Structures are given as C-alpha cells and as structure tokens.
C-alpha cells in the first residue's frame, strides 16, 4: 500500500520526537537502537488498535474504543508514536478493522508493546550485531522490525502462535523491506529449525523456563523472559546457558508484565461461593498477614505476588465483596480471608483441602520479612535437569512449577 507523502512526513516527525523523548527519559541510550526507533514506521504495524475509554458510570468492565486512521486519523497516528501499549486483540478473536466496534471488558491476547519496553528488552538481553536471535511472540511485528533494522533480517527468527497475527505482521514486515524467518509456532517449544541461537527474547510470559529454550541456546548464550503465574505475579530473568543444559541468572528489577503464553494461562475455576459451600472445615483463625501484602498497588506487593505464587503455584486469587478467595483447581484446596470487622486491619482465614494455601503464603511472607524484604535483584534462578528454583541467601529455596 502506498501511503500519502504527508502521512509519511508526519510519521517521521513523530518518530523523531518519540525517540528524543525516550532518550531524555533514559530509555534509549544506545545509538543503534535509537536509529532503529527513528527508522521503523510503527504506524504500519498497527492499522487498528483499542484504547481504553471511561467506564460506564465509573464501574463495570473497561470500555475499549477502536482507533483506526479512518475513524480518527490524528488520534491513530498520535497513539502509534506514543510510548504506550496498543491492544490489538481480545480473547483470541481477530477484529474486523474495516468495521470495528467498541467492546467492554475482555482479556487482551495480542498487542504492540510500548516502544520503551521493546528496546529495553533487546538491550537487557545484550543483543549485538552478529547475534542470531529468536523472538517469541511476533505480535504486530513492530519489535521484530526493530531487531531487523539493528541486526539485519538474516539473524532474526520470530514465532507467533496465532496465524492471523503472524500473517498481518509478515505483510507489514515485508512492506518495510524486512525478511526475517517467521513461523506459526508455540513459543513453549522454541523453533528447532533455526537453532541454536545466541539470544532468545520472549514477549510473553511463562510459568517456568521452557526446557526447549535452554536446549536451543548456544553455550554462553542468553535467554530473557518474563516469569508469571496464576496469581499474576511477574518477574523478569536474564539467564546465561552453560554447555551442559543448565542455565542460571538473576532476576531483573522493575514491574514489567506480559500476557501469558496461551498454554500457560490460568484455567477457569468456577464460582468462589461453590468452593466455600463445599466446606472449609474448622474454625477461622487470625491471619498473620493480610491479603493486602500481595494485592496492594506497590512495587513490594508486585514482587511478593511472584514469590508467594511459587509456594502455591496452582492457586488463583479473587475478591468477591470483602472476602478474598484463594482457589487451587489442582488439589481442590481453598482459603477464604475476611476482615474481622474491628477496623484494625486484621483478617480471619478459613482453609480447607489437602493444602493449607494461606499458611504457605504466610511462610513465604515470614521468611521475606526476616530476610529484610530483599528486592528482586537479590534472587537468582537456577535451571537444571532436576527442576527450577529461586534462590536467595536468606530465603528458603522456592521451586517453580514443572514447565
């Protein structure tokens, strides 16, 4: 498609402004990546996307408004060159951008990640000229285009589980003159035909490090990915692979979150009231820690959610009214936390099933407090034939679930 000259001129101007803004904020200090950001036309990769609008009556699900050049050219172009994530798909359903409609709620399943995070991921992975790279999660193809611009197409492989997403991304990439290796594939298994790789970077999250990624990385190569879980706790880790199939690395700081790999998404668990009705035997006890330790909108809680879900990897958290439910679909265990009503911040907890879920959470919180509340950068992840464990000098070893 041939685009109007004024559009390309405006886009180039907005790209330069965005790159300068990222540089001023310290998010783009590498000349090579800055040149890529100034060159790659992001608008070509996002012909349509959703932006959040106001909630109806201030409540209920988020109202998502479609944005395209036809609907509002100025808003579309300005958003394309803003440092924001642009949601392009919900619940795995491919939108009809010729006739887009507003929607309410839904789970985002594809997006164009905010540019500052894209370049941060490539930089954190220490991607350099001459490296062969596997990107997991092509999405719109924008981050793939940045890698191609910096490294050349020959060294870039990108896989995407959604064939419709990959088809659109491929068209945009080829239209910009890039020809990386693209494939419809589940990132859980990497991409053996192009292995081994010097770097693997994932734009989705996993409950544990997929063994295939370690096997497909050259000795001394690095894997950058986001770990997540069913409590929606996240941590980024940069692993260095050894020659014997193991890998080790430290967690990275920050509060980055990515959509889960579709095969690692949390399952539906039904109505929390049914779990309570099924029986939480015994008396309630006073909880040593309240749920706000892991639900508050703070960096500390963000980090803690990741740590405690290692102790209860199959549990999910949901709040109904003033009751916080912890539900484990694998073991059938459940816990319910209720404020004691005295206004002193104390909580009562009842637990049932073979696993005392909140007791496990409290043990992690006790150890975390006793260790001086260490940040994510003080934890390391070890991946070996016998499993995967988070390690810290003063916190008991925490296993990740089987990948």
Image (cartoon, rainbow, N blue to C red):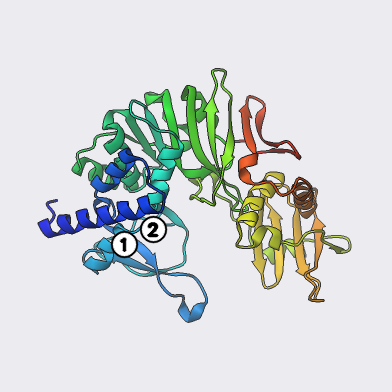
Q: Is residue 169 left or right of residue 367?
A: left
Q: Nearer the viewer, residue 317 or 176?
A: 176
Q: Quadrant of residue 245?
A: top right
Residue 131 at what x, y percent from top left?
Answer: 37, 27
Q: Nearer the viewer, residue 273 or 64?
A: 64
Quadrant in the rendering for residue 86: bottom left
Residue 118 marker: none
Q: Position of residue 169 (x, y in %)?
A: 29, 45
| Residue pointed to by mark 1 | 79
The answer to whether marks 1 and 2 mark residues whose Cβ atoms lie closer than 8 Å is yes
Question: Who's the residue at 82% across and 59% down the image?
Answer: 288
Name the residue located 79 percent from the left edge and 48 percent from the top edge: 370
x and y, in percent, of residue 291 in the image: 71, 61
Give the residue at x 41% y 30%.
191
**Residue 44 visible at all:** yes
Residue at the limit of the structure toward the bottom, as seen here: 57
Q: Earlier in the sequence, mark 1 or mark 2?
A: 1
Residue sticking out furthest to the top: 243
The residue beneath circle 2 is 84
In space, the residues marked 1 and 2 are separated at their CA atoms by: 7 Å
Q: Position of residue 74 (x, y in %)?
A: 23, 67
Report the label total. Answer: 2
Q: Nearer the viewer, residue 105 or 235?
A: 235
Q: Residue at x 57, y 18 (%)?
A: 244
User: How packed is label 1: few (under 14 Cα within 10 Å), some, or many (20 or more)?
Assistant: some
Dot 1 falls on a residue whose secondary structure is helix
């Amino acid at each position: 498609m041939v685009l109007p000259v004024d559009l390309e001129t405006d886009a180039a101007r907005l790209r330069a402004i965005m790159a300068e803004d990222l540089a001023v904020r310290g998010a783009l200090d590498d000349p090579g990546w800055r040149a890529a950001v100034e060159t790659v036309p992001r608008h070509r990769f996002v012909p349509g996307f959703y932006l959040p609008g106001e909630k109806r009556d201030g409540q209920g699900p988020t109202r998502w408004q479609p944005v395209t050049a036809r609907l509002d050219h100025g808003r579309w172009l300005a958003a394309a060159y803003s440092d924001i994530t642009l949601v392009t798909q919900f619940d795995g359903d491919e939108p009809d951008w010729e006739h887009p409609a507003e929607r309410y709620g839904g789970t985002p399943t594809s997006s164009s990640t905010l540019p500052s995070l894209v370049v941060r991921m490539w930089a954190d992975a220490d991607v350099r000229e001459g490296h062969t790279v596997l990107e997991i999660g092509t999405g719109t193809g924008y981050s793939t285009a940045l890698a191609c611009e910096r490294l050349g197409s020959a060294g870039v492989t990108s896989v995407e589980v959604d064939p419709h997403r990959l088809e659109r991304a491929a068209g945009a990439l080829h239209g910009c003159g890039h020809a990386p290796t693209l494939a419809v594939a589940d990132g859980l298994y990497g991409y053996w035909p192009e292995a081994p790789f010097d770097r693997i970077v994932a734009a989705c999250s996993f409950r544990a490090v997929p063994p295939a990624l370690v096997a497909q990385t050259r000795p001394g190569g690095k894997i950058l990915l986001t770990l997540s879980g069913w409590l929606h706790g996240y941590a980024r880790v940069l692993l260095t692979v050894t020659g014997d199939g193991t890998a080790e690395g430290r967690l990275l700081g920050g509060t980055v979150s990515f959509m889960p790999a579709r095969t690692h998404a949390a399952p539906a668990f039904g109505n929390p009231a049914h779990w309570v009705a099924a029986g939480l035997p015994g008396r309630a006890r006073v909880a040593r820690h309240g749920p706000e330790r892991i639900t508050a909108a703070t960096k500390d809680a963000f980090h803690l959610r990741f740590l405690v879900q290692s102790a209860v990897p199959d549990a999910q958290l949901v709040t109904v009214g003033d009751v916080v439910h912890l539900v484990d679909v694998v073991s059938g265990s459940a816990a319910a936390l209720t404020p004691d009503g005295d206004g002193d911040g104390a909580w009562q907890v009842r637990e049932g099933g073979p696993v005392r879920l909140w007791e496990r959470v409290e043990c992690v919180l006790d150890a975390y407090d006793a260790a001086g509340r260490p940040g994510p950068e003080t934890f390391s992840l070890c991946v070996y034939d016998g499993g995967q464990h988070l390690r810290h000098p003063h916190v008991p070893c925490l296993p990740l679930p089987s990948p």
